[in-house]
Image (spheres, coloured by chain):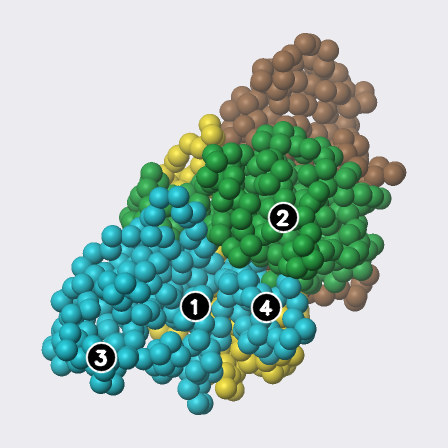
Chain colours: A cyan, B brown, C green, D yellow
Amino acid sequence: MSEHSTVTGLTRDEMAQRCALDIPDGSYVNLGIGIPELVAAHVPEGREFIYHTENGLLGMGPSPEPGAGDPELINAGKRQVTANPGAAYFNHADSFVMIRGGHLDLCVLGALQVSQSGDLANWSTGAPGAIPAVGGAMDLVAGVKTVYLITQHTTRNGEPKLVESCSFPLTGLGVVDRIYTDLAVIDVVDEGFQVVELSPGVSFEYVQERTGAPLIPADAGTCG
Amino acid sequence: MSEHSTVTGLTRDEMAQRCALDIPDGSYVNLGIGIPELVAAHVPEGREFIYHTENGLLGMGPSPEPGAGDPELINAGKRQVTANPGAAYFNHADSFVMIRGGHLDLCVLGALQVSQSGDLANWSTGAPGAIPAVGGAMDLVAGVKTVYLITQHTTRNGEPKLVESCSFPLTGLGVVDRIYTDLAVIDVVDEGFQVVELSPGVSFEYVQERTGAPLIPADAGTCG
Amino acid sequence: MIDKEVVSVAEAVADVFDGATVMIGGFGEAGSPIELIHALIDQGATDLTVINNNTGSGEVGLAALIKAGRVSKMICSYPRSTNSTVFPDQYRSGHTALELVPQGTLAERIRAGGAGIPAFYTPSAVGTPLGEGLERRTFDGRDYLMVLGLTADFALIKGRVADRHGNVVYNKTARNFSPLMATAAATTVVQAASVVSAGELDPEVIVTPGIFVHRVVAVANPAHESALIAAGASYP
Amino acid sequence: MIDKEVVSVAEAVADVFDGATVMIGGFGEAGSPIELIHALIDQGATDLTVINNNTGSGEVGLAALIKAGRVSKMICSYPRSTNSTVFPDQYRSGHTALELVPQGTLAERIRAGGAGIPAFYTPSAVGTPLGEGLERRTFDGRDYLMVLGLTADFALIKGRVADRHGNVVYNKTARNFSPLMATAAATTVVQAASVVSAGELDPEVIVTPGIFVHRVVAVANPAHESALIAAGASYP
């Protein structure tokens, strides 16, 4: 823990920006609520992504100018958005044909916990008395070709979010491909969590100390 | 067979006209190829039917004026038609949502054979070497609320089409509600074939002689 | 002449009965048929099972129906929103039960109900608490769950324009669940900002064909939930 | 900039491989992508499994593909039409196999394939020869058959207008199976009478959203099967 005082890791915007770098030009992308939404502000020069929102719009654009919005043109987070040229509206069944049918290239979601076998928990802490709410998360992880997560590496209390196995109720089994945290980019491979890169000024050991499962170093050979 | 020389029964048009009398105003109707198509020409005064064709049109209108048609505006029989005011086009899955989902009030089909328990055979004689072709018939009989048949009472060779049990491959089991033939109108009830009315100049015995199962007279009590 | 127009929202919902299952269109406020819901509150039917993606916001529309104690069960995917305080109270008190369904499964179950498909298989929720109790089956080496179609006694829907045959077009993302619900209810009621004659809508662009719609009522200037909440409104 | 337009029908079908499964849009001649089919004949791929409601007419379009010996299996509902003589010959000679599927089940199987639904239950064909060998199950006292989703390697589709993102609108009853097939193929190729820039189609009226379409090619004056047959045409 010796580095603690000097390590800050990436900001929310930087995590989103790092994630955006890995999304190929022309991808059809669904962005979850929270940090994932910030990806849209960091599309690399020369690339174009087409955003899907599960409530029935492909080709979602940014928020409208103040006063110019339509309360019936919203995203899955129920915030007003716009429609880009080439957009299309459709019903909810067709929207999930896109998701469940494997037509979306990629989704970027938040996480409460993710296990070394790629299980994701991101909809409920299972706390007694909480109102359970799942939305489209289970459909997205089951259907979208590639699932990226953006999340702080640990909870506010410093507990690891990357764990051997999730204690919270699952969203999906073995569904996560890659995780972008403030501290590192980590792939889920057959052997577990493999570090792809460390954030500037962050050591492997520092990340390992804050991770609830063994990390495989970036240069280790794997069959993942 | 003493009446043979004087009995002609209803014409094709008269059968269609008789059937049309029983269709309530405002019904959503699918008409099969052949005699059933003639129903559209005999809508009783003051009633309006909306015609569905399974290839994706609700609100089908009559044939276009010569030269005014569009080869891509056709009916299930692949003949050019028109679209009435209030029509809608839709894809094939949605078209069969209407059929399978029980949204159509009524369909009128042709028949090769119909059994006293309402089984219908109308797609194949099972002859060796014949190319089997079913189209939408099995979906129609399985999904539409009320299934009427219009058919000659016997084959060209004088064999009964109304039989105890069908020898031809079935289209559906227990699906037929009412049969309009040149000789009679006959309901399929729990006890079998019940005569609703005889065509002008046709006796019960005459029809019975040409039917392959017992007929229940029109005035017999049934629980059908 | 076929004319499905009725003169008032009150007439449109007059026959909703106690214990009915009611699908209500909308995702958040987009597509929420607020005037039909308020008419249903006035009408008085209770012990309703309501199917909607959410549970309403503030104390208007669906939230007001729940607050009035009329909803004994909600089937939805996301009963948690900003300004959603009514449902949590009714849920915690045990007055309103909850069947939580993943959003895509909810949409497809409604479509299946309308399509005469009693059940289908989906990969969503396999291995999760929402998959518990469902039959599991493997196709091509992957696990799926069998889920059942959903139907309803009534669907209350908001369109942009409807014609008197019941054809409907929608506004942007207000479309969402409504075209599916229209197919899955025994009686589908549509409120639309304008009701026009048959033939005024282009047959190429109709989203809900009239066969699925039983009543149409004009509500010229429909309220938006967010505007009502901002104005501090509650219903009744 | 996303631009799915390719310059020729030859380029559009260049990668169709021997043994591929190809869905071809159209019901009879309405929506038949004749120019794409002719390009496929020129391209030479063989041992194809073709999914189409019918089996073509005359000796153009789909019938020409069958006549050229390229189709080892047809999956369809109605392989019998006026002027349909090519398929019967190939079927009786054993060159082309036939999987006959009720029309509504065929449409729904394609939709399911595109929707990630491996199987569903339908009441169609229960108790008939086309239901033999299928698993039967009772829901609410009624019998249903389990049928599997259908997918393909390629879909060849005819639209009226497409934009460069792949959004498509159709002409009247030429729509039929095409929007379903677009969702169910790994590679969907659309010929359209005009190809326009993204933004020129109203997002409210798009029938096939661009996510389902991989290539778009302009065929300004597409041939109609009936006109070709009337003119005595055959292909090649």
Tag 3: amino acid: Ser
Which disc, if any, is residue A34?
A: 1
Say which residue label 4 marks: A80
- Chain for numbered disc 1: A
Rendered residue at 59%/41% (across/down): C66
Check the image and name the residue furthest to the bottom.
Answer: A45
Of the pair A92 and C89, the residue shown nearer to us: C89
Per the image, label 4 sits on a secondary structure element best described as: loop
Circles 4 and 2 on the same chain: no
Looking at this view, is C56 or D94 the one in front?
C56
Q: Nearer the viewer, mark 1 or mark 2?
A: 2
- Looking at numbered disc 4 in the image, what kind of residue is underneath it? Gln
Which SS class for mark 1? loop
Q: Dot 1, crowdedness within 10 Å: few (<14), some or many (≥20)? A: few
The CA span between labels 1 and 4 is 15 Å
Q: Where does the image place residue D181, in percent across and percent down from the top left?
A: 49, 62
Name the residue: 15% across, 74% down. Answer: A1
Q: Residues within 10 Å of mark 4 (few under 14, many from 20)?
A: some
Residue pushed farthest left?
Answer: A220
- Which residue type carries mark 2? Glu
Whichever of labels 3 and 1 marks the residue nearer the N terminus, that label is: 3
What is the x, y in percent for residue D79? 51, 54
The residue indicated by pointer 3 is: A5
Q: Secondary structure at mark 2?
A: loop
Residue labelled with disc 2: C59
Sequence-wise, the earlier of marks 4 and 3 is: 3
